[in-house]
Image (spheres, rainbow, N blue to C red):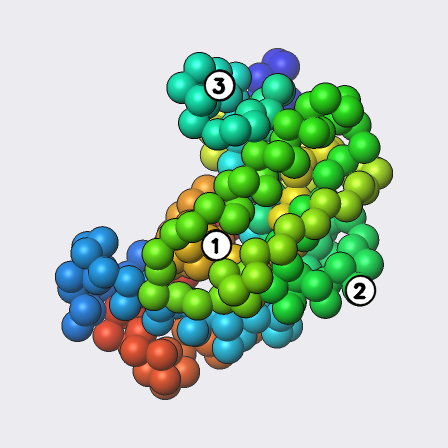
Amino acid sequence: MQKVAQLHQIQNRWAEYSNLEVLYKEQVGDNASSFSGQGGEHAKEYYDWYQSIEGKDGVYLVNTTYYNTDTLRVWREGQVYKHTPTAPYWEMIASPNYLAKYGPSVDQNLIHQAQTGTRVYLIPDTLTSANRENLEGYLHDYSVRDRESAISTAFGQHKRVVFVTYSPSKEMFLWNEDASLPNVSIDPIILVSTTQNMIPMESESLWANGLTNSYIKLDSTATEKYLDSGYLSTYGLDDNKPISSRV
């Protein structure tokens, strides 16, 4: 009975987002080499497309990742980073309008900073001081690491990172399909994400598809408008015919 109740709870949580659609699949287009990972042209097409609709009604960005004990241990023992978080955590990358609707309130000044290229991280006040220090050190070092990319952002020019404390007050949906992990968290680490403060790992992943992997979420009106072949053709995506699927 307990498992049935848990399944019902999970279904109800997913149902709250049933008005949104995620990228589901696409066809190999004219730039097949880029599509197969041999270049950045396809990623640039998606970045330009998303940048043109960023913040518009019904257009959201959200992606989550869980960093578990094993991952952190490998980082620590291998000295992969100068700083390593001391405890497992969820990281949520989310657009300002997604957070306005589903997450904690974000000050307009912080949103402006994010829109002009600063990576703005919201850190919950539930962390210990030692964990927070190591976490912020890791997030800063990871963000400013030099990376090559065909996509240029304002962050890539000045590499500024700020950390702001927030007080968790509501559970946040994690877009997680792994039944062994929770599908909500009250205190994720949150990156207020814009096209100008992305690093290549993010800007080159906007065409990822599926419930867990996708970044871009659209409501039905935005889907009809922005996945229209005429609109996609402006960004060289009409040949890929991206298809969305309801949550």
Q: Is residue 123 left or right of residue 242?
A: right
Check the image and report above or below for 247 versus 29: above
Relative placement, left or right, of 44 versus 39 is: right
Which of labels 3 and 2 is toward the front? Answer: 3
Q: Check disc 2: other Cα within 10 Å, few if <14, some if 14-19, many if 20+.
A: few
Name the quadrant containing residue 46: bottom left
Image position of 137 with respect to 44: above or below: above
Per the image, the residue denoted by label 3 is 76
Query: What percent of the width, then of the height, locates residue 61?
Result: 56, 57
Q: CA distance from mark 3 to mark 2?
A: 36 Å
Helix, strand, or loop for circle 1? loop
Query: Label 2 vs label 1: CA separation?
Result: 22 Å
Are the residues tagged 3 and 2 within 8 Å (C-beta)? no
Q: Amino acid at mark 2?
A: Gln
- How many residues crowd mark 1 within 10 Å: few (<14), some (14–19), many (20+)? many
Q: Is residue 94 visible?
A: yes
N-terminal-most mark, 2 or 1: 2
User: Residue 108 shows which numbered tag?
Assistant: 2
Residue at the spot of label 1: 199
Residue 104 location, x and y as percent? 78, 48
Q: Marks 3 and 1, Cα distance to the nearest angstrom?
A: 23 Å
Name the residue rendered at 56%, 28% in the picture. Answer: 83
Residue at image coords 78%, 55%: 106
- Where residue 99 sits: x, y (%)? 70, 54
Nearest to the eye among marks 2 and 1: give it.
1
Q: Work out whether 179 lies above or below 236.
A: above
